[in-house]
Image (spheres, grey):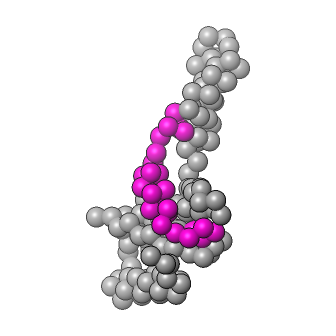
Amino acid sequence: MSDLVVIAFPTEAKAEEVRQKLLKMQKEYLIELGDAAIAVKDAQGNIKLNQLVNTTKAGAVGGTFWGALIGLIFLMPLAGAALGAASGALAGALSDVGINDKFMKDTAAAIQPGTAALFVLVLKTSLDHTKEAALQAALAGVQAALPASPA
């Protein structure tokens, strides 16, 4: 079973700091993350998502490789690479992995301008019950330390 955690932060830098700590915990096999994205709300109310994986870039790189490989068969590797990159980038831009982008944008609409929200999809953890409780308390403490937003 997975858990989705959303935490609001006063700045994007603080949200990124917490995300990096979670990624470090993942490298130490203490936690397994499905996704960890940051939503930032600017002064105009626009929401920008900062995700771990840029699907457009990954699609373009993969498309370039496969396009060049197929292009070699037809003796047109450059045209194949260009066509593969374009189609891969388009496929990457249209795909969504991890937490649903629309859900993140809708949820981040509730935060104050100039602040950020960290979305973490936790798949599983190898922490014992005391360490897991300490992590939950730390995450709850971060949320409690934030000023309450006006309703």
Residue 25 in the image, given as x and y percentages of width and height: 51, 73
Residue under the point 60% across and 67% down? 113
Side of 106 relative to 52 (left or right): left
Q: Which residues are magenta?
A: 91-116
Q: Residue at point 49% right, 78% down?
A: 150
Residue placed most toward the observer, 36 or 24: 36
Residue at the image position 40 percent from the left and 82 percent from the top: 136
Q: Name the foreground residue: 55 vs 39.
A: 39
Residue lying at the far front in this picture: please name it. Answer: 151
Asked if 16 appears above or below 99 in the picture, the reply is below
Q: Is residue 92 above or below residue 131?
A: above
Residue at image point 49% right, 82% down: 148
132 and 107: which is toward the camera:
107
Is 93 a magenta residue?
yes
Q: Residue furthest left?
A: 1
In the rendered image of this protein, does residue 104 appear above or below residue 138? above
Does any portion of residue 98 appear in the rendered image? no
Q: Residue furthest top?
A: 74
66 or 99, nearer to the observer: 99
Quarter of the picture containing the C terminus is: bottom left
Does the rendering let one see residue 117?
A: yes
Q: Position of residue 12 (x, y in %)?
A: 63, 69
Q: Quadrant of the N terminus?
A: bottom left
Q: Quadrant of residue 58?
A: top right
Where residue 122 sits in the image (x, y, percent)?
40, 66
Q: Does 27 appear in magenta?
A: no
- The percent position of residue 13, horizontal first and vertical second, equals 66, 71
